[in-house]
Image (cartoon, rainbow, N blue to C red):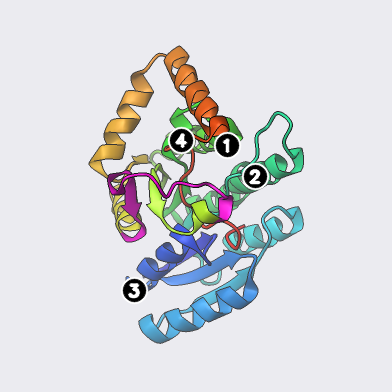
């Protein structure tokens, strides 16, 4: 059925992507920092699904490591037909007065790495006349909630521009824009969302299933669930002044400890996913 490469495969949505792709009989290339965790997952996938599972440990803040992953995407033997750029994390600190290095790492993982790996993948895919790229963005891309939102906005617009360039080549590009997802992402990022109602949350299996279905039909923007689709439409048509005002209100609430931002972060396999 082909080979898929998933970044951030050791946790969160990346882990769910690996399982759903393997059980659909796709071979997988698993990319994350934690080699031990990847090896354990690869063994489970081989045993449960009978597929080839390659392990490619890489810290995606390291440009040499990113280039090793790019080389695998260019490889002609067992070519990658689906790239899932899933790795990412919320910096967890403000930009003003915060640790700049943390924001630079996030930029490396969620912007530069996405660009480099996509470039490597689509070059090979276009030559073969088939393939797909799935970039994990976020509903946060439509907000003004910190550098995470800015990084995810870049992913969304980049994917749309890529889809335009790829039209007619047999290769597609899809941006996944989920909302809050039940995984370890928020806990690792230090975001206290426990008090939010259950209706605000999505399940990882449903998000991934919807995303893969949208890739199969060639959708450019994938926003799982009706409620987040509505949230996205409202955010998209709101005047930007109103979007900024909402972000400022959320910021004040966070600083006062009264509430937390409900849209800033989507799950992409933080930590081991980089």
Decide if residue 240 is on the left or right side of residue 272. Answer: left
Q: Which residue is mark 3?
A: 23
Q: Which tag, 3 or 4, sits closer to the chain's start?
A: 3
Q: Is residue 192 above or below residue 46?
A: above
Q: Residue at x 41, y 86 (%)?
A: 47
* Closer to the eye: label 4 or 1: 4
Residue 9 screen position, x and y as percent: 52, 64
- Comparing 274 with 191, the one in front is 191
Q: Which residue is mark 4?
A: 259
Residue density around tag 4, few if under 14, some if 14–19, many if 20 or more, within 10 Å: some
Residue 89 screen position, x and y as percent: 58, 49
Q: Which of the 4 quarters of the picture holds residue 262?
A: top left
Q: Which residue is mark 2?
A: 106
Residue 92 screen position, x and y as percent: 61, 43
Q: Residue at x 54, y 25 (%)?
A: 252
Q: Which residue is mark 1?
A: 151
Between the C-alphas of marks 4 and 1, the distance is: 23 Å
């Amino acid at each position: 059925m082909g080979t898929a490469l998933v970044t951030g495969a050791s946790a969160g949505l990346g882990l769910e992507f690996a399982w759903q792709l393997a059980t659909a009989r796709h071979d997988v290339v698993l990319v994350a920092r934690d080699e031990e965790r990847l090896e354990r997952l690869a063994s489970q996938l081989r045993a449960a699904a009978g597929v080839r599972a390659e392990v490619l440990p890489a810290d995606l803040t390291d440009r040499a490591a990113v280039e090793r992953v790019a080389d695998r995407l260019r490889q002609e033997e067992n070519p990658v037909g689906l790239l899932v750029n899933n790795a990412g994390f919320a910096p967890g600190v403000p930009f003003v007065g915060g640790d700049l290095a943390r924001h630079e790492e996030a930029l490396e993982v969620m912007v530069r790495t996405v660009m480099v790996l996509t470039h490597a993948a689509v070059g090979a895919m276009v030559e073969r006349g088939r393939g797909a790229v799935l970039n994990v963005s976020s509903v946060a891309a439509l907000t003004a909630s910190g550098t995470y939102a800015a990084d995810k906005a870049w992913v969304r617009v980049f994917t749309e521009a890529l889809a335009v360039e790829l039209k007619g080549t047999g290769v597609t590009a899809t941006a996944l824009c989920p909302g809050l997802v039940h995984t370890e992402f928020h806990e690792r990022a230090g975001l206290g969302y426990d008090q939010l109602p259950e209706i605000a949350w999505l399940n990882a299996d449903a998000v991934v299933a919807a995303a893969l279905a949208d890739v199969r039909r060639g959708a450019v923007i994938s926003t799982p669930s009706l409620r987040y689709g509505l949230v996205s439409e409202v955010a998209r048509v709101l005047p930007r002044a109103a979007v900024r005002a909402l972000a400022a209100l959320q910021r004040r609430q966070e600083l006062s400890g009264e509430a937390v931002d409900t849209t800033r972060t989507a799950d992409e396999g933080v930590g081991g996913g980089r």
